[in-house]
Image: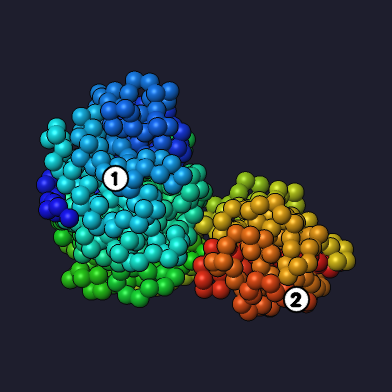
Amino acid sequence: MPTVTTSIAEPSLAATPYQGWNTYFGLGGTFTEAQVLSVADYLVSSGLARAGYNIVWLDGGWQASTPRGADGQLQGDPTRFPDGMAAVAAALHAKGLKAGIYTDAGPYMPDRCGLGSYGNYQTDANTFAAWGYDAVKVDFLCGIAANLDPQTVYTQFADALRHNSSGRPMIFNLCNPVTSPDWGNYPQSQQSTNSWSYAPQIAESWRTYTDVGFVNSIKYSDVLRNFDINARHPEAAGPGHWNDPDYLGPALGMTDEEFRSQLALWAISAAPLVIGSDPRTLDASALEALTNSDVLAVDQDTLGKQGVRVGPAGTTETWIKPLKDGSIAIALVNRGTSPAEISTTASAIGLGADRVALRDAWTHQVTESLDTISAEVPAHGVDLLIASTSTGMPLTPRVLVHAPTVTAVDGTSIAPTENVLVSGGSTVTATVTVENDGTTPAQDPQVQLSIPAGWTAAAQSTGPRTLANGEAAQYTFDIAVPTGAQVGTYSATAQVQFSSQRPDSTVTSPPLSLTVAPAPPSGTDVPLSHQPWVSATSGWMSPAIDQSVGGGNPIKVAGTVYPTGIGVASPSDIRYYLGGTCSRITGIVGIDDVVNNVGPEGGTATFSLVADGMTVWDSGVVARGTGVNFDVSLAGVRDLVLHVGDAGDGGYNDRADWAQPLITCS
């Protein structure tokens, strides 16, 4: 192996994590010059470029169907890029932007990747530089297909970039997405999870796990997966070289709250911020999040520290990131499906102060807490706070308003749940808890509910005139759902307005979700698959009615074909509203026989029925070729969930069936 340079020549290329936009998730692989320049114009006009998103990165697909010309140099698609690749870079520079481009470290293998640079590293580095590109993403699709060693070839590619014939500085994004078992059985040395061990010496950034999603589809569960694996080696990151958990995915399948959480998690991780969506399709909420000055300041802090978790891992967690000015960024992370209070202390995060000033990165509001640092965090939410020592006159006290909690529907007590099912004409009793973590009293707290138009809320209790430090009060409301309310999910939030030594303040709770459900089933042995569900998820693709997932085949378990049923991939939850009108459910569960046509990997799952939040039946682990019968009482059940888990071997090939589920209701 030849001697190569193994240090970054220009750490100033990414003194803080770079920002930009990439074509892959939003435009796919057949994008055009016109689309790229249209997005570039939008980055400028929308303010995204001004906020730092200034690299326009062409992912795979820019190349011609025959990637190399007769001269051996790479060439762009002449139809989609009629002015040539150098002209694209020049046009981007004219708009005040930077240009990024893509290749693969392996040899060109048309059946495995669109282009490859193996054997041509110096030629391609010289070409990209001569065209005027500022950044290069180097994939490993054909690298792994050719069984190459990523450390060896990426080091060679880095050397070629650093010694390009134009002397042009170019950011190197090392993009090895290979993971096991997602990609198959590969040695650790070939996987993305090993890149941290060598990439900081040769690249400005390196992918730490497989893709965060698919074209036009990113799930929050995969965001959390990539965040967790990206967090394994914070010591590898710093000015000039960054762990890269992949792209940001607003409007690609996540809720607004989930995308804000992804952005906050990437910021606490000091990760590159590259938008994967088509920015032209984003709404005001996404643009506001992407350009939030406090969130960006956390990510772009010049100290360059990657955040770490303090305290245990779990459904709720605390992560901290020291900042250059001595303050500390705090991410209070709620992985759960219902709002939760998350707390830490000044001493736990390493801040030597009793009085703590807390700046909310999302709202920019500044409050003061007495040692305790708490927030009521929405489901799948992240509260991003910036903590510093408070001195001088007291600030506005930190007051928490918990999400409304439903205690009864139509006078019948119910167990707490993250999304309460109701019907038109129902009366919902909800309680709101308010507490004061500040250093001064909250005077005359007034609590109101914000509810959908046409709904009404009547207060059933009043609270104290003064809420001192450490005190909490509860307020009860009856919410009336209109008789003609349309099926759908609605939100109710609580606001508390109070006075202190500072001007009056208003604090808003996370939302309570209330779903006006479809009418419950009616009849004897009714196929449940033909009833409208409240919600349905599948690990990949979408739940299939009367078919196995992902192919349109009839449901077939252990050699028997069933005319009705639901096909899903794990993990999966399918939720139905029963309203207390049903008596029993029967059926068969199993792995669909079609899995045997796909491959030997995976193919085990667990099935359970969850009634009003409690598991009333569990299949245990179900393997291929086995059907498991169930016959379960549903007397009095309002809310039924059909749950499928992956049995511990991942969701690959878990083509799970609820075969012939029949329900009896009055």
Rendering quarter of residue 574: bottom right
Q: Quadrant of the N terminus?
A: bottom left
Q: Is residue 309 visible?
A: yes
Camera-near label (1 vs 2) is 1
Are circles 1 and 2 on residues that touch, CB within 8 Å?
A: no
Judge whether 598 appears above or below 171 on screen: below
Q: Amino acid at mark 1?
A: Tyr
Q: Position of 170 compared to 590: left or right?
A: left
Judge by depth and name the residue closer to the eye, 615 or 57.
57
Residue under the image location 42 percent in, 53 percent down: 212
Residue under the image location 75 percent in, 76 percent down: 630
Q: Is residue 465 visible?
A: no
Question: Which residue is the site of mark 2?
Answer: 630
* Residue 150 horizontal/vertical position (percent): 28, 56
Q: Amino acid at mark 2?
A: Phe
Rendering quarter of residue 471: bottom left
* Secondary structure of residue under mark 1: loop
Mark before the other along the chain sequence, 1 or 2: 1
Instruction: Single out the residue that lies furthest toward the right.
Output: 524
Q: Position of 596 compared to 81: left or right?
A: right
Residue under the image location 23 percent in, 63 percent down: 197
* Residue 16 horizontal/vertical position (percent): 20, 48
Judge by depth and name the residue closer to the eye, 534 or 558.
558
Q: Position of 150 compared to 59: left or right?
A: left
Residues packed near mark 1 inside 10 Å, few (<14), some (14 to 19) or many (20 plus): many
Quote the CA–CA distance across marks 1 and 2. 56 Å
Q: Quadrant of the C terminus?
A: bottom right
Question: Which residue is the site of mark 1?
Answer: 118
Judge whether 424 appears above or below 627 on screen: above
* Secondary structure of residue under mark 2: strand
